[in-house]
Image: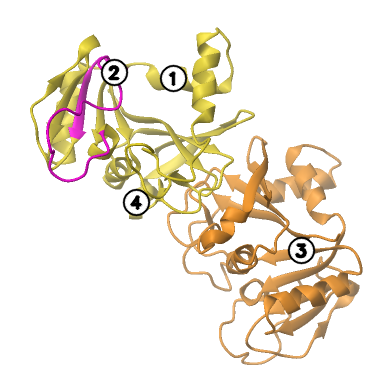
Chain colours: A orange, B yellow
């Protein structure tokens, strides 16, 4: 059975996935300097042919993913109706997805085919419907929930996530958007199956009970 | 200079130091089964002469402490005025402190000298005054803030804590009392100086910037 997976979601020691004041210049908001350093270092290590706990986690995150779902805030910094349609995501003309990406938003616009096989679809359908479309697009492979925190919470509350890879880094953010918040009883459906640390990050894996 | 230290404060992966419904039979509330397993195992290992990351952390927590400060909820499950004075803490007649313990409460009662050198003092003075008394009692050694979460937060907000050893365990609690909550800008005064994991727990150390 194909799965719904979340990977590389990085939170500070106090649990924040983003700081206050998320915006174009600072997509993750303030006070989050260094939050994703582990990932940058792991990608550099991988490019240099090095291995290690962090590199292995990055590699697991990319295996067997056939479609991605993300929230509108992960697609771009705009809020409310699109002023124009020039924004095509944070990732340039050849985004690193190479498959169908479903962007959840109340503000629909035509699908955007990008280079390299990525197509952004905009949808305001219920998450169950979005997920069904994503599974169909994935053609037997898994679906990844890309983020941000609010979108992950939405799927956690509905207990639709099979595997959530959470990364805790030694930073204090203090305020902003907590990942494991607004999840209510949804969290009862999960347990931590794995806890492993590198020198710079602690990786936890949440799976369904 | 003697320090203000906090040790072994254990939180779930989602940041809770206690679950909902704290009470006599369940001092840490519901949904926290296993929260302190790492500590029980480490103390057993130490008793058997074994070493390891968790044992080492427990040993560090006990070094050079001359006095303890705790909140009233850590001393006992009662809320509001004392109904009688029969309650003498959770720890039996010979508590594992062996020094002066200052219990912060609006409901004063006479000091209780216990066996083994522990004396419980009850105080409603400002935290700066309580801390000054604790340092005096400690006679040059460090003062430990014993807990619970609300008391740790009080001292964090005032940036009076020099070192906070936080333990993250792979459990999800979902609701209750978060340790790093209600800290506001106080948290800006701290950084994470250390992150080290055993098979069962991740130890982080917060120090002042």
Q: Earlier in the sequence, mark 4 or mark 1?
A: 1
| Mark number displayed over residue B169 | none
Residue B161, placed above or below residue A78: above
Question: Would you call the spot at circle 3 few (<14 residues within 10 Å), some (14-19), or many (20 or more)?
Answer: many
Residues at marks 3 and 4, CA–CA distance in whole angstroms? 34 Å
Instruction: Tell if the residue under mark 4 belongs to the same chain as the one under mark 1.
Output: yes
Q: Is residue B83 magenta?
A: yes
Residue at 77% across / 90% down in the picture? A110
CA distance separating discs 3 and 2: 52 Å
Q: Position of residue B77 (x, y in %)?
A: 27, 38
Question: Dot 1 corresponds to which residue?
Answer: B60
Outermost residue toward the top? B49
Based on the displayed image, in which of its 4 quarters is residue B112 positioned?
Answer: top left
For discs 3 and 2, the disc positioned in front in the rendered view: 2
Label of residue B183 in the image: 4
Discs 1/3, front: 3
Percent of width and height locating residue B19: 43, 47
Label 2: element kind: loop
Q: Secondary structure at mark 4?
A: loop
Q: Nearer the viewer, mark 3 or mark 4?
A: 3
Q: Is residue B74 above or below residue B53?
A: below
In the image, are marks 4 and 2 on the same chain? yes
Chain of the residue under label 1: B
Residue located beneath label 2 in the image:
B95
One can see residue A99 in this view: no
Magenta residues, start to end: B76-103
Name which residue lies at 52% across and 12% down.
B46
Label 1 neighbourhood size at 10 Å, few (<14), some (14-19), many (20+)? some
């Amino acid at each position: 059975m194909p799965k719904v997976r979340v990977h590389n979601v990085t939170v500070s020691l106090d649990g924040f996935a983003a700081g206050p004041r998320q915006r174009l210049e600072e997509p993750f908001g303030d006070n989050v300097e260094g939050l994703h350093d582990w990932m940058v270092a792991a990608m550099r290590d991988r490019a240099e042919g090095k291995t290690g706990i962090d590199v292995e986690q990055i590699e697991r995150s990319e295996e067997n993913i056939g479609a991605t779902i993300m929230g509108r805030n992960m697609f771009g910094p705009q809020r409310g109706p699109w002023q124009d349609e020039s924004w095509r995501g944070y990732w340039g003309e050849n985004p690193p997805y190479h498959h169908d990406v479903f962007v959840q938003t109340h503000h629909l616009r035509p699908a955007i085919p990008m280079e390299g096989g990525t197509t952004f679809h905009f949808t305001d359908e219920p998450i169950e419907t979005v997920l069904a479309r994503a599974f169909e697009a994935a053609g037997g492979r898994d679906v990844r929930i890309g983020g941000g925190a609010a979108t992950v919470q939405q799927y956690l509350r509905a207990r639709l996530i099979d595997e959530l890879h959470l990364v805790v880094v030694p930073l204090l953010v203090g305020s902003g958007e907590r990942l494991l918040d607004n999840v209510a009883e949804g969290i009862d459906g999960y347990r931590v199956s794995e806890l492993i640390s590198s020198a710079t990050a602690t990786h936890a894996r949440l799976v369904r009970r």
